[in-house]
Amino acid sequence: MSDPKPKLRPLPAFIFMSRWLQLPLYLGLILAQCVYVFHFWVELKDLIGAALGNEAALQHIFTAVAVKGAAVPEKLNETTIMLVVLGLIDVVMISNLLVMVIIGGYETFVSRMNLETHPDQPEWLSHVNASVLKTKLAMAIIGISSIHLLKTFINADAYSEKVLMAQTTIHIAFLLSAMAIAYTDRLTTMTHNDSKTH
């Protein structure tokens, strides 16, 4: 018969319980996710309405993708559709980022979810830790940055060379940061494995 787990002393137990203060933050992110879902369906409804010839939906689409200094198209064209779809993809990628932060953060910093036997358990959750979460978040941010950069280059005529260079530099900075995080994580893992073998 195994010995019962020792009880924590009052102060360590109180400090450990403080992790539950993060719960309202994750609940707030879930509400933010709801806002993104609503925004996605509003934009999708307007895109479908514009494709079917609804004038109000068409004007809303033009306003949503308008760039200062760029000519406003008179009808729905391929570029406008592409910009709206890129905006929808952007919402989906930010939503994926929110899911990773909510589930991964809760599992890592608050409490176990015990999803091991659940058929829909995310593949990455089985080996999630702070380092893995940081790497996945960095990759998601690069994806979001790529979408914004593509939207900028589609309307490149409306932007100055300085703005284009600044956005490209920021995107490269995100790439280098993600590579640095992944490399640091790899070094940490290798060091941990080496210490276990000795």
Image (cartoon, rainbow, N blue to C red):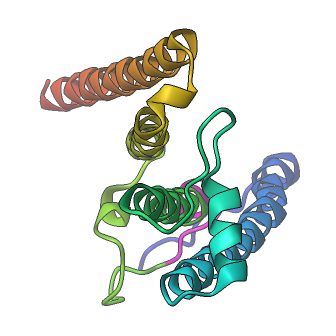
Where is 61 relative to 162, above or below? below
- Residue at (82% x, 48% y) in the render: 15
* Residue 38 percent coordinates (x, y): 69, 79
- Residue at (12% x, 30% y) in the render: 197
Viewer-nearest residue: 48 or 128: 48
Query: Does 87 sit left or right of 82 as displayed?
Result: right
Viewer-nearest residue: 64 or 174: 64
* Residue 88 percent coordinates (x, y): 50, 65
Residue 153, by quadrant, is top left
Viewer-nearest residue: 98 or 37: 37
Prevailing secondary structure class for the magenta stretch in the rendered image: helix
Q: What stretch is highlighted in magenta?
A: 105-113
Where is 197 relative to 38, above or below? above
Residue 159, by quadrant, is top right
Where is 120 relative to 89, above or below? below
- Residue at (49% x, 19% y) in the render: 164
* Residue 175 percent coordinates (x, y): 36, 25
Viewer-nearest residue: 85 or 8: 85
Query: Does 67 sit left or right of 161 as displayed?
Result: right
Q: Can residue 187 be seen in this view?
A: yes
- Residue at (58% x, 56% y) in the render: 105
Query: Does 90 sit left or right of 39 as displayed?
Result: left
Q: Can residue 36 be seen in this view?
A: no
